Amino acid sequence: MRFERREHRPAALVIATPVIAVIAALAVAGVLIAFAGAPVLTAYWKILTGAFGSRLSTTETLTRAAPLMLTGLAAAIAFRARLWNIGAEGQFYFGAIAVAAASAHLFGGLPSLLQIPILFVVGAIAGMVLLLFPLWLRLRFSVDEVVTTLLLNFVAILFVSMLIDGVLKDPTAFGWPQSEAVADAARLPKLLARSRLHIGLAIAVVLALVVHFVQSRTVFGLQSRAAGLNPAGAGFAGVPLARTLVIVAMMSGGLAGLAGAIEVMGVKGYVTTDLSPGYGYSGIVVAMLANLNPLGVVLAALFTAIMFVGADGMSRSMGIPTYIADVTVALSLISMLIAVFFTQYRISR
């Protein structure tokens, strides 16, 4: 018996792959829940009701999904072109701190109609810068971007920590390390009154549609896919690999930086070192669960948000550790990788 590469991947198999991966992950996680002494079906029902059982929980789930969509898109765009961006967490923080600084010291006096778009651009540019440097190292010195982008996460977070403990520290925070707050005009409008749900969710969904159109209906989308599938063949066919990767890096880093900007402008209002509960790293899982499909990223981000928010409700009601959500998401990633392998290869005798 041997593995043989498929000449054609059936569409039904590609669509079913994420569903199979999630079911397999839930099944394995159910074993762990059973070992914890809790009924499995009841625990999963508590997760679902914890995520959508009330107006508050529903809006919190959707609020959590917005940055996951953006970091998921950032990873999906980069990975499809075989640019391994593991630095979305650092790019998230760079976008967040750039927005806080720009609003507090440069554009705070502008009206919302001008200030919000400008801050979006500022956050996106900050994320781009943090990814373009590792890409330059790869193109100039063949340095592996997996290492550089991963290590830059820690550099970025420590740099942000230095800023919010120094020049950008809020003097009204009673010594607590946080940045100066963004101006009131920079706060994103709410989608629902008396909730934290803001228009960042709608922006993330629209950007997913835009990315899907770019990748499936434009010359650049074809070039980026070709660069990921076969760089040598793409270069031989005339695809400008360096320029394509630069544009891909700008899109990927920009989306991750925009996620940080949206989180500050829509939810927190200021930057702390615990602003992100791992949105950058979770975005990788979201992208893989979506099979790098921009539209699938929306659903995968929603699933991940359900697990994180619902696990809190399950933990309070049943006494099960909330880490079961992290375990389930991680198992989903492993299951997805295995499932993707079998969509590309089949066992032959």
Image (cartoon, rainbow, N blue to C red):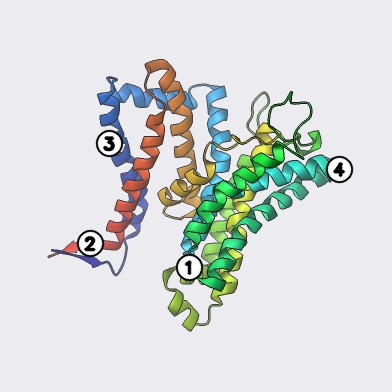
Disc on the earlier residue, 3 or 2: 3
Q: Which is closer to the viewer, label 3 or label 2?
A: 3
Disc on the earlier residue, 1 or 4: 4
Give the amino acid type for the residue marked by disc 1 in the picture: Arg
Q: What element carries label 2?
A: strand
Q: Which residue is drawn at 41% across and 21% down?
A: 315
Disc on the earlier residue, 2 or 4: 4
Q: Which residue is drawn at 30% across and 26% down?
A: 33
The image shows residue 301, relative to residue 177, as above or below, that is: below
Give the amino acid type for the residue marked by disc 2 in the picture: Arg
- Quarter of the N terminus within the rendering: bottom left
The location of residue 273, given as percent across then percent down, is 61, 36
Give the CA distance from mark 2 to mark 4: 59 Å
For the residue carrying disc 1, how many other residues have a C-alpha within 10 Å: few (<14), some (14-19), or many (20+)? Answer: many
Q: Residue 180: which quarter of the image?
A: top right
The image shows residue 7, relative to residue 53, as above or below, that is: below
Determine contact: label 1, label 4, CB under 8 Å: no
Disc on the earlier residue, 4 or 3: 3
For this orientation, the residue located farthest to the right is 109
Disc on the earlier residue, 1 or 2: 1
Residue identified by numbered label 2:
346
Residue 279 appears in the rendering: yes
Residue identified by numbered label 3:
28
For the residue carrying disc 2, how many other residues have a C-alpha within 10 Å: few (<14), some (14-19), or many (20+)? Answer: few
Question: Of 42 and 280, which appears nearest the observer?
Answer: 280
Give the CA distance from mark 1 to mark 3: 34 Å
Residue identified by numbered label 4:
110
Residue identified by numbered label 1:
225
Question: What label sits on residue 215 in the rendered view?
Answer: none
